[in-house]
Amino acid sequence: MQERCEGIFREVEGKYGFRLHEIGFDRNHVHIDLDLGVNFSVRAAAKLLKGTSGYKLLKEFPEMKRKYFWGSGLWGSQVYFDSTGQDSDYMRAYVRNQAGSKPKRDEKQQSLLSFVN
């Protein structure tokens, strides 16, 4: 199912022109590192990705809907957004390794608290 979900995300990527750099599945959620460009808001991209994948996955796997979702949708309404700034490699490693151990914080990275007096 994860393979099919990623395939659907890639279809959405191709259709709407944003760039998915990494997709990482954990037990009950997914993290995605993507470049939206200037044409999409985070909310609009989430709606396209969640809406398309939810519709297609529940249609293709009806037994999953009956067993786990009792008529509701696949995805929750939550969306978390963060900007990677200069160190996109760190974020991509985090997304890529969702089900495994989380990468350690770079020792050169400063805490936000170090800027507050």
Image (spheres, grey):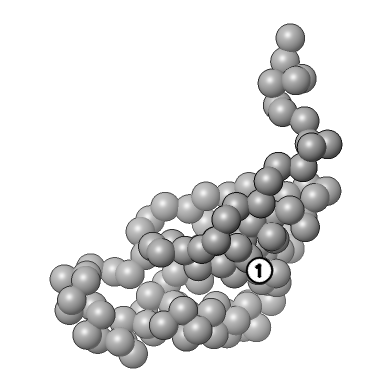
**Which corner quadrant of the image does residue 24 belong to?**
bottom right
Q: Position of residue 63 (x, y in %)?
A: 22, 85
**The N terminus sits in image quarter:** bottom left
Q: Position of residue 22 (x, y in %)?
A: 65, 68
Picture residue at 76% right of the left edge, 20% below the top: 115
Picture residue at 69% right of the left edge, 76% below the top: 17
Note whether 98 is above or below 74 in the view shown.
Answer: above
**Which corner quadrant of the image does residue 68 belong to?**
bottom left
Crowding at mark 1 (Cα within 10 Å: few <14, some 14-19, many 20+): some
**Residue at the farthest bottom position:** 60
Note whether 105 is above or below 6 in the view shown.
Answer: above
**The C terminus sits in image quarter:** top right
**Residue at the farthest front position:** 101
Of 85 and 46, the residue lying toward us: 85
**Residue position marked by numbered label 1 in the rendering:** 22
Q: Position of residue 31 (x, y in %)?
A: 55, 61
Task: Report helix, strand or loop for mark 1.
Answer: strand
In this rendering, position of residue 94 left or right of residue 72: right
Given the image, on which type of amino acid does mark 1 rest? Glu
